[in-house]
Amino acid sequence: MIAPDTVYACIDGLDGTASVIDSAAWAARRLHAPLTLLHALERPEPLPPVGDYSGLIGVGAQEVLLQRLNELDEERSKVAHQAAQQMIQESLKHIDPESVPALHTLLKDGNLTDVLLEEEPTARLFVLGMGYRATTARKLRLDHRVESVIRSVKQPVLVITNSNFVAPTRFVVAFDGSATATRAVQVVARSPLLRGMAAEIVMAGGEPTVDLAEKLQAAQSQLAEAGFEVTTQIIPGLPEEAIPAHLAPRSDTFLVLGAYGHSRIRQLIVGSTTTALLRLSSVPVLVLR
C-alpha cells in the first residue's frame, strides 16, 4: 500500500529516466516523503483484424486464425509486463534505498494520466521526464503525455527537461500578475521543497502598469515573509522567449510556473505560455496549481 504524501517518479526506461529518479529522490529528501518508482504500462495496439476469408481457406480456418491472434495479443502483453518489471528492477539499482525516507515500486496498466489520477490521493509530487526539447517557440508540440498530466492532476508536477540532474540552489518564478501565478507564489511560500534557496521573480515584457507593479511587490513580500531571499526582475520580450534565454546559463535553477491560466479554447487560438515555457526551458520546471 502506497503511503500518503508520496513523491512519484514516473519512469519509462528512456534516456531521461536516471535524471527523473535523481530529481524525485532529491525532492523526497527535501519533503521527508516516501519515493515510489512508477511505470504506467499502456496496452500495445491490437493486431489488425482478419477479414472473412472462410470461403477461401476452409471451414473453421478463420476461427483458428482469430484464436491465434488472441493468443499473440496475450503473449505480447505478457512480454511487455516482463520487460517493464525488468526496467523497474534496473531503475532500482540507480538509487540507494537508504538515501530516501522509504522506497517503493509500482507497475500499473493504463495511460499515464489515468494512472496518476488514480494515485493522486496519495501523492505529494509527480516527477516526469520529457523526451525532447524544442529550440524555438514555434516548433514542435509539448509531449502530449506531459501536457495531459499537467492539465489533469491537481498536485504539483516537476518536469525534468535535461538528462543530468543538478540539485538546484535557486529558483525563478515566472510571474505575470495572473491568479495562477499568484497562487504559485503562495504554494512556494508554504512548501519546504524550495526552502532556503535564493528566489527571483521574473516578469517579461515592458514596463509594468501600476497594478502589475503592486502585484509584483506583493509577491516579493510574500516570499520574503516566508524566509526567502528574493529579488525581482523585469526583462524585455515575450515570456516564452525571454525567460528561457534568462535561464539558459543557470543549470542549478528551477523554473516555477502556475498551470494554464486560460481556457483550453483560448489556448488553442492564441497558444499557451505555460506550454511554450515547458517546451523551451533548459532547466527543470515545477508546475503548480
Image (cartoon, rainbow, N blue to C red):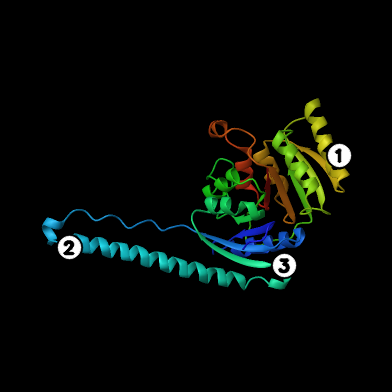
The residue at which mark 3 appears reads as 100
Q: In the drawing, does residue 220 fall left or right of residue 237?
A: right
Image point 46% across, 70% down: which residue?
82
Name the spot of residue 160 as percent of width and height, x first. Answer: 64, 55
Secondary structure state at the residue bearing disc 1: helix
Q: In the drawing, does residue 138 fall left or right of residue 49?
A: right
Tell me: residue 182, above or below residue 227: above
Q: Quadrant of residue 94?
A: bottom right
Image point 52% across, 47% down: which residue?
144
Name the spot of residue 216 as percent of width and height, x first. Answer: 80, 35
Of the two numbered discs 1 and 2 in the rendering, the one whose residue sits closer to the viewer? 2
Amino acid at circle 3: Val
Secondary structure state at the residue bearing disc 3: loop
Name the spot of residue 100 as percent of width and height, x first. Answer: 72, 67
Query: Which numbered disc flags the more N-terminal residue, 1 or 2?
Result: 2
Q: What is the CA distance from the residue labelled 2 to the residue labelled 3? A: 57 Å
Name the spot of residue 70 as percent of width and height, x first. Answer: 31, 62
The residue at which mark 2 appears reads as 61
Q: What is the CA distance from the residue labelled 1 to the residue labelled 3? A: 33 Å
The residue carrying pointer 1 sits among few (fewer than 14), some (14 to 19) or many (20 or more) residues within 10 Å by Cα, namely some
Tell me: residue 184, above or below residue 165: above
Residue 57 - label: none
Residue 221 - label: 1
The residue carrying pointer 3 sits among few (fewer than 14), some (14 to 19) or many (20 or more) residues within 10 Å by Cα, namely some
Q: In the drawing, does residue 59 fall left or right of residue 208?
A: left
